Amino acid sequence: MTRPLRIEYPGAYYHITSRGNERKNIYINKGDRERFLAYLKSAHQRYGAVIHAFCLMNNHYHLFLETPKGNLSQIMRHINGAYTNYFNIRHKRIGHLFQGRYKAIIVEADSYAGELS
């Protein structure tokens, strides 16, 4: 069975979540969190992602993200892929860091923004 396509369009707002594989921590130390934040910044610079709010938990994260260019898959491939490569090299491990696909729920910015952030 194939996965359903993600809905992507310019100006969309998403509540994004991604959890560590086997619910394990995805940040081991302060440096890992700082590197993840650097990937969020580079997602803005490279792909135009607008990150309105974020929350980094030990084994998952939440983003309130806007895609002015309608390119969510590129943004998330950059964030999760680049961070996984960094994490695996830094901590001498192999394999998946994140459990399955990230979750992306389309939200209405006006009604959901306050509650989400």
Image: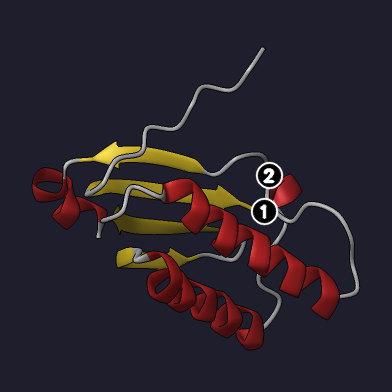
**How many C-alpha atoms fall within 10 Å of the one at disc 1: few (<14), some, or many (≥20)?**
some
Residue that carries the numbered disc 2 in the rendered image: 99
**Residue 81 left/right relative to 88:** left
Q: Residue at x 73, y 74 (%)?
A: 86
How would you rate the neighbour count of disc 2 (Cα within 10 Å): few for under 14, some for 14-19, many for 20 or more?
A: some
**Could you say where residue 15 lies in the image, as x and y percent from the top left?**
35, 48
**Disc with the residue nearer the chain's start (1 vs 2):** 1
Say whether residue 36 is visible: yes
Relative to 86, residue 113 above or below: above
The quadrant of the picture occupied by the C terminus is bottom left
**Residue at image x 57%, y 79%?**
33
Residue wearing tag 1? 20
- The reply to whether discs 1 and 2 touch (Cβ–Cβ < 8 Å) is yes
**Where is residue 66 shown, x and y percent of the image?**
28, 56
Residue 26 appears in the picture as rendered:
no
Instruction: Give the camera-side residue of 74 and 61.
Output: 74
The image shows residue 47 at horizontal and vertical percentages of 41, 64
Q: Name the residue rendered at 82%, 69% in the picture.
A: 88
Q: CA distance from mark 1 to mark 2?
A: 5 Å
Location of residue 48 with respect to 23 vertically, above or below:
below
Q: Quadrant of residue 6?
A: top left
Element class at badge 2: loop
Q: Dividing the image into 4 quarters, which one contains the N terminus? A: top right
* Label disc, if present, on residue 112 of the rendered structure: none
- The coloring applied to the image is secondary structure
User: Residue reaching furthest top?
Assistant: 1
Please state if 106 lies on the left or on the right of 36 as rendered. left
Q: How many marks?
A: 2
Left or right, 26 with respect to 116, comes to right
* Amino acid at the residue labelled 2: Gln
As drawn, 88 above or below 37: above
- The amino acid beneath tag 1 is Gly
